[in-house]
Amino acid sequence: MLELESVVAGYGRTVILHGVGMSVDDGEAVALLGRNGMGKTTTIRTIMGLLGARSGQIRFKGEDITRSSPEHISRLGIGYVPEGRGIFPTLSVYENLVMAARPGPWTLERIYSMFPRLRERRGNMGNQLSGGEQQMLSIGRALMLNPSLIILDEATEGLAPLVRDEIWACLQKIKQTGMAVLVIDKDINALLRLTDRNYVIQKGEIQAHRTSQEVRSRREDIDQFLAL
């Protein structure tokens, strides 16, 4: 479904990604792991067209999207939950959800069923929500696009444990629908319960590619890249 081949990208004169290659197949969950500053978010921003690739190729469902606009990439079927959530603070919960809605199985009612607190707060502005509620709204808004792939960058960062558990449970439900998932998160144990495969990025290069079963049996292969 999604394939990156030898992708080079960066900011100004600084190159961050040095030939990144990875893929996400139809219906699977994949994690991109790595310490802070290793290129995880840069990879996601490059996929979404928010940062231009200097060389290499990005394909989605066989289409070259390397130099496509974020709007075009979104319309092709990629939902994005950015680090920092990116909700509209002066729009209501309802308005945030319906503004980018597209026809499909993920309806407003289905989002409200998955996140009952959004139903309760549907008239509240985005800036009146707690951090956990804002994250639920960001995920719900991405799902309202009815994407084939959803990308989540630090979806549980800074949330209370009970809220994190709720988010992980929702991601499991999303995966069970057959939607592909690409996720960045620091909770390795929770990731391994969700993902099928895992890539580790270090200094802008993919250093390891393991199935979750392989990681569970030889955790030290991954931990060596994640230790501070």
Image (cartoon, grey):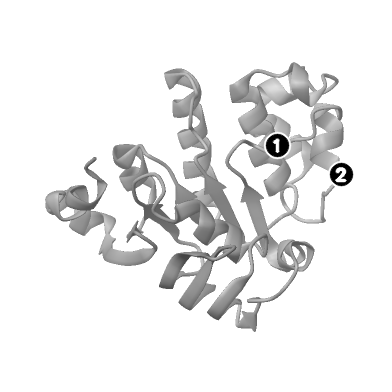
- Identify the disc placed on residue 213: none
User: Is the Cβ of the residue at disc 1 closer than 8 Å to that at disc 2?
Assistant: no
- Judge whether residue 174 can be spotted in this image: yes
- The amino acid type found where label 2 is placed reads Met
Task: Tell me where residue 83 sits by quadrant.
Answer: top right
Q: Callout 1: helix, strand or loop?
A: helix
Question: Residue 179, can we see it?
Answer: no
First reached walking from the N terminus: tag 1 or tag 2: 2
221 vs 181, left or right, is left
Left or right, 52 with respect to 106, comes to left
Which residue is rendered at x = 55% and y = 58% of the image?
44
Q: Residue 201, image x and y in percent?
A: 35, 59
Position of residue 215 measured from the top left corner of the image (x, y, whole percent): 21, 54
Local packing at callout 2 (Cα closer than 10 Å; few below 14, some 14-19, many 20+) is few
The residue that appears at 45% across and 48% down in the rendered structure is: 184
Query: At x 62% / y 45%, what residue is drawn?
Result: 81
User: SS at mark 2?
Assistant: loop
Residue 105 percent location from the top left of the image: 72, 52
> Circle 2 sits on which residue?
99
Q: Which of marks 1 and 2 is in front?
A: 2
- Which amino acid does the dot numbered 1 rest on? Ile
- Pick whichever, 7 or 137, lies toward us: 7
Q: Distance between the residues labelled 1 and 2?
A: 14 Å
Q: Which of 199 and 35 is in front in this view?
A: 35
- Picture residue at 84% right of the left edge, 31% below the top: 94
Q: Relative to residue 74, is residue 42 drawn left or right?
A: left
* Above or below, comparing residue 4 to residue 37 in the picture: below
- The mark found on residue 111 in the picture is 1
Eyeballing the image, is 80 above or below 122?
below
Which of the image's four quarters has the C terminus?
A: top left
